[in-house]
Amino acid sequence: MVASQWYMGKNMSVDVHACLVAALLYIGLSGAGQGSGEADGQERAVQVVLTNSHPEASFAVSPDVVSTSPPVLALSFPRVVNPSNTGFQISVYFSYRPVQKGSGAPLRTLVGTGSLYPADRPGGFVLRASKAFSTLTAATATDVRLVLEIQPLHHAAPWPPVEVTVAAPQWRQENRD
């Protein structure tokens, strides 16, 4: 009886290890194709987080979006942590490299700014992107990113902790009825 218990215990240990290895391989392989929503292999961020200590984050903008130049940008903020209800604004830029300038520091063009009201609740806003896209087209832009930067509305006062989660940008065509 002791020998059979040892044999079952030994086989069970091997079986558990085999299951763990199989599960890890399955998770690794199933996640390998996810996150690469871009045809050119760039990873597409699902969301970014802005804080007063890390006030800037960005999303890659695919060449397809740049070439179609959708006129409307919708931004959604599904999570806001702002216990003191401090007013803030979010500035939105395109960061890009013009082809004729070669490799230098990226340039920026403002898409627009917006804020949430109340400042401690999730929400969103819509910006017109047409003018900023025309700047990108004129510059024959490459390496385009959508940059978001959070700033306090009152710069003189100390800024208490603020955390804003930004969902992936939604590019839209205008609805014309």
Image (cartoon, grey):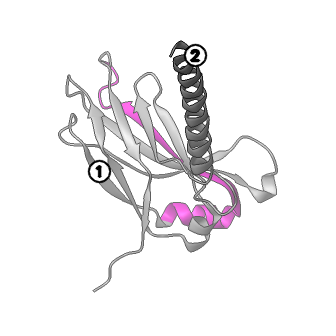
The disc labelled 2 sits on which kind of residue?
Ala
Q: Residues within 10 Å of mark 2 (few under 14, many from 20)?
A: few
- Residue depicted at 29% across the width and 38% down the height: 79
- Tell me the SS state at disc 2: helix
The stretch drawn in magenta includes residue 38: no
Quadrant of image for the C terminus: bottom left
The stretch drawn in magenta includes residue 143: yes
Q: What is the number of the mark on residue 3?
A: 2
List the residue tagged with mark 1. 124
The part of the image, by quadrant, that contains residue 170 is bottom left
37 or 115, which is in the foreground?
37
- Residue depicted at 25% across the width and 32% down the height: 87
- Residue depicted at 60% across the width and 40% down the height: 22
* Left or right, 2 with reference to 112: right
* Camera-side mark, 2 or 1: 2
14 or 168, which is in the foreground?
14
Q: What is the number of the mark on residue 177?
A: none
The image position of residue 147, as x and y in percent, is: 52, 44
52 or 131, which is in the foreground?
52
Instruction: Give the extent of the magenta segment.
Output: 131-156
Kindly give the residue lying farthest to the front in the view shown: 1
Q: How many marks?
A: 2
- Tell me the SS state at disc 1: strand
The disc labelled 1 sits on which kind of residue?
Gly
Kindly give the residue lying farthest to the top in the view shown: 2
- Residue depicted at 59% across the width and 22% down the height: 7
Between the C-alphas of marks 2 and 1, the distance is 67 Å
Q: Residues within 10 Å of mark 1 (few under 14, many from 20)?
A: some
